[in-house]
Image: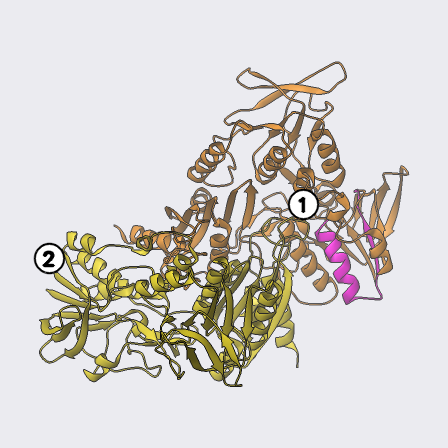
Chain colours: A yellow, B orange
């Protein structure tokens, strides 16, 4: 059997390795437009920060290791067109400037996503970066090491991680966000608190501009960026810029071949990760996801999900029967001493989805107050007023916020009501939690709110 | 209405405060044989360690604060006899050496537990301690500050916390455990690893004796302990001893009044925390608990549970309708850089309860390997072979073990199978987790084991 895999960062690499284990006699060819395969893209901010010296640390498996397993890796080879009728893919070699057709019995599309470029004048100046691939990370780190000021446009997960990275490198940072507060994927009330908390540890190291739009970059004679202009007309100096205003799925060539996209614009797949066309699977950031809570369609591109989907696609391709049920929207990001973590629906998204969300916010110690390393966390818990069903949670702060969100995910998976969740027996000892965990405080308040009127 | 509460550490103090809020016009009298009321007994090891200077930090609410709320606190007042027919309790004043009858409309028994004293010759020597009350903590700290060597008998949660405390104080410690490994509440395979990990950071600071029994204490002319003798005949020198060989519920006076005990020997209660006698509630360490997983009866005395039960008893006493469903057996303990955390059934207890437990153990990084603060955790996951039902988990190590156990508790509460649990979407970012969390690795291995034969 001839298996062709398009894309090779997380989902594609995982699918290749798993397919070979399940079908040792199959021919597996992986084509990627990238110069690297099988790496932790999520680790790029930590490479830039200098947590490790060699970018090769990010490589999970080298092309040589794949080849030793009998998987052929074709770097700088971009999929241009899929021909489902003849089961062929047109591949363009980026290094040799030629194109060729390859045949497949089974095809896996794992072409990921690419940065969204906002409409900014002079966006092609030198030292204006996006962060997606290893070369991006290397270029950003090299430039950061000789810069004094960096501008980060967008304050999603990557923007926030880069804020930390550049601060740790000793650069002054300006982060520009179009929304009223940073991390707009959180509810506004939480994003506002995140911003206040970040500002509280500023110490002149960074500046957060919100409700601000970068309209143009300013350049010197060498075509290098030296500043930017905002919608309010103000001009700022900077030595380099990283644009982190989101990503979009690489799906155009798939759509052109008749592969259906979902309502989110990513490739529509069933629980087997199969597209609408037989023998063509899609997984990773190019594929649409299902929100387990209510079965609605979402597009939340994350490396952990990509790995799971690559595995499931390979199992089904090899004749197995494994479902990928979907995601809960769980995510976490760190900036210096602060953690911001969430799972499930935010209040705003829950309302858009037709729920009647009620929420409770508590700010509490993350462990008993007399412990020397006690810190605050602020926790928001969301449930549906009509059914009491838990819908999601957000936790932020210098304390152990991430533990609380991970304590919620199985409750969402099990479709527990907030009433049922109050029966939860979390671990307790003074170094780990107050006697009553903040999660249970929040759940109790939420119950009282639901019972009211 | 006249409400009498017997005992005032966690459950009793919580019940008193909650009752007063719900029934402002009630007369509430709390009798305790202790010299303090409403304190964090769980914090005593951290007071001994010196994490805070004043023991008063442990007090949640002072007798004066209770009195200001209209709750009468009677210290050093021990309940001797309950007379359910006449709704009276015979109280003995320990300070004044007199006894008197008090009347109640509703009675809450929250008399807690006391240390089990093992059969050791000369157990009443000076500088042989148990740790239960604030005075115990003060006496142990005072003696530790002038001692060079301490012996801890028993390696349950308190023994392990005291091991840390005494090491931090600079004492040499010998910990003596009758079982083959420390922390025998964990499965043997995990206890063995705990012991190996503790020994790996020993640095000559402590010695762990296992499968060893202390048979006698040795004394000097002043009646002070100076050593101990074990079952194998060996003699050891020491300056002080803390006996941590477990606790038993204070229930004898209740049993004598016709209040039914459960199969565990603690006071039998229903979900309202009501005993078999109308108007008499029991909560906290003196009361039996229900294991949520299968409804079996257990006795796991913990401060966090006591607080919840005190609250539920008060609500029902005040005419409300609130159930306490039970516990999952969740617990956590720290020793220096190591965390040991568990929830649900151990494999051995699951087998005793009639399940067919299968288990998977993985040792993994707690975050991505290239992060500077990465550490190992070893995780054991247990499920029933017949049904696939998740039964419990244990996690230990220098890494973030406690987060994984708290991620399991809602799965036990929601009675998820291990198959369902593999669909869990935990948070991921390099500082917090590997791409695939160790919990999901373990769940996958467990599924494969269940599917086999």
Residue A182 in the image, given as x and y percentages of width and height:
53, 73
Name which residue lies at 48% across and 64% down. A148
> Do circles 1 and 2 both sit on a common chain?
no
The residue that label 1 is drawn on is B43
Image quarter where the N terminus of chain B lies is: bottom right
Residue B29 among those drawn in magenta: yes
Place of residue A327 in the rendered image (x, y in percent of width and height, measured from the top left) = 39, 69
Identify which residue, A240 or A282, lies in the foreground: A240
In this picture, is A355 found above or below B14? below
Q: Position of residue A140 (x, y in %)?
A: 38, 64
Q: Label 2, secondary structure: give it.
A: loop
Judge the density around disc 1: few (<14), some (14-19), many (≥20) Cα neighbours within 10 Å.
many
Magenta stretch, residue numbers: B9-34
**Whole-percent x, y for residue B353 in the image:** 46, 46
Look at mark 2 in the image and give the residue it sits on.
A25
Is residue B352 visible in this depiction of the protein? Answer: yes
């Amino acid at each position: 059997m001839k298996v062709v895999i398009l894309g090779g960062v997380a989902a594609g690499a995982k699918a290749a390795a798993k397919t070979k284990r399940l079908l040792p006699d199959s021919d597996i060819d992986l084509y990627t437009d990238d110069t690297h395969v099988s790496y932790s893209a999520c680790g790029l901010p930590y490479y830039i920060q200098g947590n490790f010296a060699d970018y090769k640390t990010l490589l999970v498996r080298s092309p040589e290791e794949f080849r030793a397993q009998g998987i052929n890796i074709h770097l700088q080879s971009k999929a241009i067109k899929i021909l489902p009728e003849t089961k062929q893919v047109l591949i363009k070699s980026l290094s040799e400037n030629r194109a060729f057709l390859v045949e497949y019995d089974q095809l896996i599309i794992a072409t990921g996503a690419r940065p969204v470029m906002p409409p900014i004048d002079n966006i092609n100046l030198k030292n204006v970066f996006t962060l997606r691939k290893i070369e991006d990370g290397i270029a950003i780190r090299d430039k950061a090491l000789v810069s004094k000021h960096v501008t980060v446009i967008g304050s999603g997960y990557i923007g926030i991680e880069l804020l930390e990275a550049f601060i740790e490198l000793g650069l002054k940072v300006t982060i520009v966000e179009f929304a009223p507060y940073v991390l707009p994927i959180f509810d506004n009330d939480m994003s506002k608190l995140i911003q206040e908390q970040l500002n509280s540890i500023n110490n002149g190291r960074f500046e957060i501009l919100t409700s601000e739009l970068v309209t143009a970059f300013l350049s010197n004679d060498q075509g290098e960026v030296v500043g930017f202009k905002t919608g309010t007309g103000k001009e700022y100096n900077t030595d380099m810029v990283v644009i982190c205003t989101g990503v979009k799925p690489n799906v155009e060539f798939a759509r052109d071949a008749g592969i259906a996209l979902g309502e989110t614009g990513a490739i529509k797949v069933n629980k087997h990760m199969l597209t609408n066309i037989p023998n063509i699977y899609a997984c990773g950031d190019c594929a649409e996801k299902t929100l387990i809570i209510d079965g609605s369609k979402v597009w939340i591109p994350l490396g952990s999900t990509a790995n799971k989907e690559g595995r499931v696609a390979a199992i089904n391709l090899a004749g197995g029967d494994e479902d990928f049920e979907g995601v809960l929207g769980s995510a976490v990001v760190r900036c210096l001493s602060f953690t911001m973590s969430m799972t499930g629906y935010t209040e705003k998204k829950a309302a858009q989805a037709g729920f009647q969300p009620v929420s409770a916010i508590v700010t509490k110690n993350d462990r008993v107050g007399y412990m020397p390393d006690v810190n605050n966390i602020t926790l928001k818990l969301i449930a549906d007023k009509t059914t009491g069903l838990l819908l999601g949670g957000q936790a932020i702060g210098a304390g152990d916020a991430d533990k609380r969100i991970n304590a919620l995910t199985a409750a969402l998976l099990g479709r527990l009501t907030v009433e049922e969740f109050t029966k939860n027996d979390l671990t307790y000892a003074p170094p780990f939690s107050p006697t009553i965990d903040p999660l249970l405080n929040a759940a109790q308040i939420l119950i009282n709110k639901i019972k009211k009127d």
